[in-house]
Amino acid sequence: MKKTIPLFILSFLFIYIACKNNTQNTDASLEVKKEIPEEHKETAENLIENDYTALIPKGYELEYSATGDLNLDTVNDLVLVVRKNDSPLVDREVMVFLKDENEFNLDVISKTVFPQKYRSREDDITNYDQEEIAIENGVLSIKLYGVGPQSNNFSRYKYIKETLMLIDIECYAMGAGSHERIQYEVLEGNIKVETTNTMEDDMPTEVKTVQIDGIGYAFDICDTEELISYAYTRISNRNKFTVVAKNGLLIRESPDVNSNRIGKLPFNTDIEVLEKTNVLFTFEDEEGYTTTEGHWVKIAVDNLNTSHQYGYIFDGFLTPYEQPTIFRGWQNADYIYINISKNAIDYQLHGQCQYTYPTKVISENEIELIWAYDADCVFDSQLDNDFGLQKHPIKGEPFAKYTLEGRILKVTYYYPEWVKTYTEKVNKDTFTNQYTERYY
């Protein structure tokens, strides 16, 4: 069943959606814990058929509902969109209930897949002109229709390994002189943009595509507007790459490993590929344990101290360019890894210890780690040891600040004496002062 409610929106300028990107890899997303807030836990009892009042949390009102078999168990499930009217722009949440033989059970809540209702409450301007939600063939479909600066935003979700995941997004916008459609198959990593020039009689269409790594986004953390912005960025930068060879990447005179060396690109250098040759090359490490396959690609080298205008590098040690962001994976050496999101910092040491810390976002380039003792470690981590020091980490208080400088992550510890003592007495590798981007 599907309900459609038209809304009014007044606007006539076209702009792209611009939001920050926040990603996870597929495996990590599939392991998201389904922790339901306390205020929602008591709502899945005593449901009267076609009356969803008992399922709606206090302080919320029902806006949309949809029924259908979402987890393909032949029993119709339920999705509710509820709104919190006392919030300035009317926040909305999407609640997914899976039904067994007797009752609906709350499975997951998302505060991000449905945008706030209004862009301006004072002028009664809504974010979208029309909104639809439906369940069909095991897929949850959300369609948001906009005009002017707010383009259409369609997204689909389905259960994968018992977790509701984003499948794909489609966005369509009409502006002065052109129409644009973007499709992002998230799990497969396929991005396609079609731009139609409406100023010419035959209205030619230009198609751009890019293949990136497939990424999994769990329903409860997915923000489709951010992902559309991310997809546009990847299309725009599809010819830009970053050097991931730890010792740098040699530039040669021609696409041949035996040709003259004319320069070298340091690790983490951003470059633009002018042309991809059909010349294959396989790199084998000194020990012979691993091989890397790729092609020779042409780049401009006129900014280097060389008489050459162009050169060639091996693309096996290039990764698609991404705008530097603090919210990603980082590493120090080959055995200290951290992953920073807006909600947590996950820390891995030697593959033997994993720590999880809450965070406080200061700015786009700064984040604080809040001290906690949540550790899974094969040895005694001693994170709760004060070592007899008067100033030591306190649970729930800021412990360190992480700052993004270019493509380097630098750390400032608020308890330097404690960190020094811990490093000397427990583990010298746990607390380091800087990290580089991690490429998987």
Image (tube, rainbow, N blue to C red):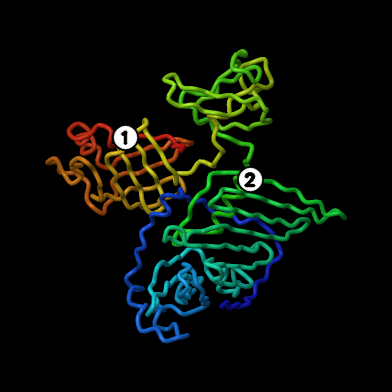
Residue 103 shown left or right of residue 382 in the figure: right
Residue 82 seen: no
Compare residues 12 and 109 and report the one nearer the observer: 109
Q: Are marks 2 and 1 in contact (CB under 8 Å)?
A: no
Q: Secondary structure at mark 2?
A: helix
x and y percentages locating residue 301 in the rendered image: 64, 23
The numbered mark, 2 or 1, whose residue comes first in the sequence reads: 2
* Relative horizontal placement of residue 152, taking residue 331 as reference (left or right): right
Q: Which numbered disc covers residue 432? A: 1
Q: Is residue 20 left or right of residue 99?
A: right
At x 67% / y 60%, what residue is drawn? Answer: 172
The quadrant of the picture occupied by the C terminus is top left
Say few, some or many: other residues with alpha carbon within 10 Å of mark 2 (under 14 / 14 to 19 / 20 or more): some
Q: Say the numbered circle drawn on residue 51.
A: none
Can see residue 403?
A: yes
Left or right of 414 in this view: 30 = right
Question: Picture quarter containing residue 252?
Answer: top right
- In the picture of the structure, the residue carrying the numbered disc 2 is 235
The image quarter in which residue 97 lies: bottom left
Residue nearest the viewer, comparing 107 with 112: 107
Q: Residue at x 67, y 15 (%)?
A: 307
Residue 224 lies, in percent from the top left, at 54, 59
